[in-house]
Amino acid sequence: MTLKTRNIYFIILFVISIVFGLLCTAFFIVSAVTGHIDMNLDVQRQFTLFSSIFPYRFWGTVAAIFSFTVYLPVTMGFIYFGFEKTRSQEIIFFFAFLIACLFEQLRLFFPLHGMWKTSSASLIYFGRVILMGRTMAFLSPLFLALFSGPQHRMDMERNFLILVVVSAIVGYLFPLDTMITTSNFMIKLGYGKMFGVCRSIIVIFAIITLFVNNYSADEKGLKESVGFLLLFIGYLILIECDSYIPAGIGSAILITGTILYLKPLHSRMWS
């Protein structure tokens, strides 16, 4: 992948993030004004870490999703202008994480026009796209840890394609329980605990590998690892939370982690 081609992809995602975010926001606001949002729903609490402390709040989940709407174009803008002339492979795999953040905005449609009371094709399709995005998100640190070295530079496109294809297969084949909608505006997964355990194992292994790789490099590399760990924690909180305070905590951690990850990476690429 040439530098010019990569930058074109960045521009495309930057434009899509703005347009898609505006469309989702506009549709949600119109539905709210016209009374087509059902907020009195029998949902299953999802984020067990905070569910016993913070009560479920419909608008808390909405706030968490809108965090991605703001976060994505701002981050994409910084990446494009900050890394426009660098060949950082790390940014390519971070690109997959940002696509996952884009897909999370589809959750805004679940409470509109009674969608999550049905087993419609739209509900299932949105759920599978979101699941594909979440798979891309937790595979991105693994691919970043294993395939971001100079020896993998020629295989970057192939590795990124593998990441996307594996995520698409998981999203398409993983069972969904369309009879249950969770409080974070998502269809319940058929084997949710198994998915969570696999996700945790992969992410922990990837983060440890990143720390080991960067520890032998320099101090900036270590900061990158800390930043990626924080941004991923923030992401996990935002996709699972259903209350105001966790949404605020997740947003703050996501932003802090992104800054800690990108700033030393940008400095190292230009040094």
Image (spheres, helix red, strand yellow):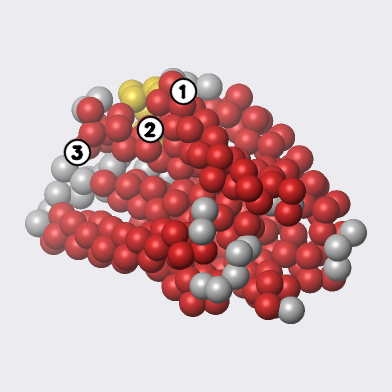
Q: What residue type is labelled 2?
A: Arg
- Residue linked to disc 2: 128
- Residue 11 in the image: x percent, y percent? 38, 66
Residue at disc 1, secondary structure = loop
- Left or right of 115 on screen, residue 72: right
Residues at badges 2 and 1 in contact (C-beta under 8 Å)? Answer: yes
- Residue drawn 34% across the image and 25% down it: 178
Residue 161 versus residue 34 in the image, above or below: above
CA gap, disc 2 and disc 1: 8 Å
- Residue 91 in the image: x percent, y percent? 58, 60
CA gap, disc 3 and disc 2: 18 Å
Residue at disc 3, secondary structure = loop
- Numbered badge on residue 114: 3
- Residue linked to disc 1: 174
Q: Say whether disc 2 or disc 1 marks the residue closer to the N-terminus.
A: 2
Q: What residue type is labelled 1?
A: Phe
Around disc 2, counting alpha carbons within 10 Å, would you say few (fewer than 14), some (14 to 19), or many (20 or more)?
A: many
Q: What residue type is labelled 3?
A: Gly
Residue 249 versus residue 232 in the image, above or below: below
Viewer-nearest residue: 99 or 93 = 93
